[in-house]
Image: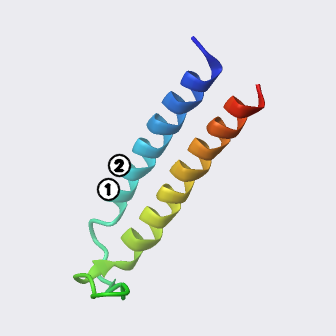
Amino acid sequence: MSLIFKRIIFAVTFNSSLFLLLMIGIQNSSNKSRINLLINETVKLPISFIIGTSFISGSVIGSLLTTEYSKKKD
């Protein structure tokens, strides 16, 4: 199996497990807030969900960028 394919599989499984733990962890979260987008506001979401999803999305983007960079380098 190629190295790039292994990295993508690892990134998907790792971030999926982080998202599952995030969903379990925010069950009793009572602090809610809105996110101000450029056009509109979102519904009230738990703050831990907002922080967790931003961390997970950054992890996904970072892992995909490194696989693309190593692909061009070879």
- Of the residues shown, which amino acid type is indicated by label 2? Leu
Across and down, in percent, residue 14 comes to 50, 40
Which residue lies at the image location 33% right of the left edge and 85% below the top edge?
Answer: 31
Across and down, in percent, residue 13 comes to 45, 35
Location of residue 64 (image quadrant): top right
Farthest left residue? 43
Q: Residues within 10 Å of mark 1 (few under 14, many from 20)?
A: few
Query: Relative to the observer, which residue lies in front, 56 or 47?
Result: 56
Figure quadrant of the C terminus: top right
- Of the residues shown, which amino acid type is indicated by label 1? Ile
Across and down, in percent, residue 1 comes to 57, 11
Mark 1 element type: helix
Residue that carries the numbered disc 1 in the rendered image? 24
Q: Is residue 63 above or below residue 41?
A: above
Judge from the rendering whether residue 5 lies leftward or rightward of residue 36; answer left or right: right
Residue that carries the numbered disc 2 in the rendered image? 20
Determine whether label 2 and label 1 are within 8 Å by CB: yes
Query: Relative to the observer, which residue lies in front, 46 or 30?
Result: 46
Query: Relative to the observer, which residue lies in front, 33 or 58?
Result: 58
Mark 2 element type: helix
